[in-house]
Amino acid sequence: MILSNELKIEKFVSLANFTTWRIGGTAEYLAEPKTVDELEDVMQWAHSKHIQCQIIGAGSNLLINDSEIEGLSICMKKLHGLKIDKENGLIVAAAGESIPNFCRQAAKAGLHGMEWGIGIPGTIGGAVVMNAGAQGGSIADCLSSIQVLSLTSKKIFNLKKEDLRYSYRTSILQKEPLIVLSAIFKLDPGHSSKKLYQLINKNLMNRIKSQPYKLPSCGSVFRNPEPWKAGKLIEELGLKGYRIGDAAISEKHSNFIVNLGNAKAEHITALINLVQERVKEKYGFRLRTEVKQLGFDKRD
């Protein structure tokens, strides 16, 4: 069905194509708004029909159940836009903007502070919610404020970084019914674009060498239980390459679970549970997941 300006709400769409794991059931309804106005339109439609909404970004940190996902799934990755103030080091990024593009555009403008994000295949919105990070950097280091839309009041308002209560891979956005619309970042201006690109390329090559980029995955599955590294603990348990169905613990990096072809959500969850049980048995604590779940009754 078409709401306005060719904005479509589709029925019974496979969500496997909306996750980097290439896994997922069928969405009862799916919309891909390109603007905030379109997002408000689809939410108003869902509200009028008494249909629940759930948000999907780039699907790079998401496991979707194989069953039908009821309600309206809203994919935000077409909500693009970047405004760059080179002099003051400010970037306003829409929620659907890809992290790698953000990093490259910042480097092009001579803005330092986001080179660590080049290999993360997610969106700005998802990164803000998760406090995404890599190679010693994180979103909390350079975020200034965000604009959100409330799923309950339907109002749009701003939140400062301090309001988000950031810690390692967590924020209040993971519990509050808020949709990130855009974010303002404060980076360090006046740097050489050439040197920033060199750093970006170096970081990207390091990630490609150490992570299984050629197979579908969600990135790191487990949070690092500091001071330990989850991947190291899993490797020490001899689980590299362990396989259930077409889901396998990567031979290249033990904190990655890869889809070898036709993996199902049940295979991924079985591997996650296995790792958590084995780690608990040997080390006395349970690994917590980074990956978020959709369509499951129980979440870690």
Image (spheres, helix red, strand yellow):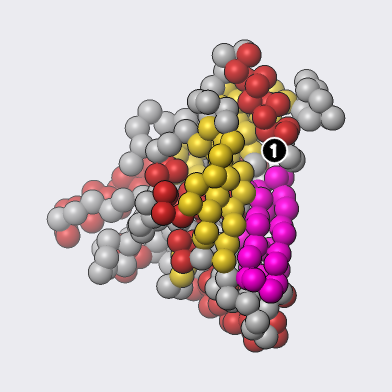
**Residue at 72% in and 59% down:** 83
Q: Please identify the quadrant where the C terminus is shown.
A: top left
Highlighted range, magenta: 78-107
Residue 139 can be seen, yes or no: yes
Image position, residue 181 (x, y; %) = 61, 44
Q: Mark 1 points at which residue?
A: 36
In this picture, is 111 found above or below 154? below
**Residue at 45% in and 39% down:** 293
Q: Between residues 178 and 71, which one lies in front from this camera angle?
A: 178
Q: Between residues 87 and 219, which one lies in front from this camera angle?
A: 87
Residue at far top of view: 49
**Residue at 55% in and 73% down:** 113
In this picture, is 100 found above or below 35? below
Image position, residue 129 (x, y; %) = 48, 49
Question: Element under label 1?
Answer: helix
Q: Please identify the quadrant where the N terminus is shown.
A: top right
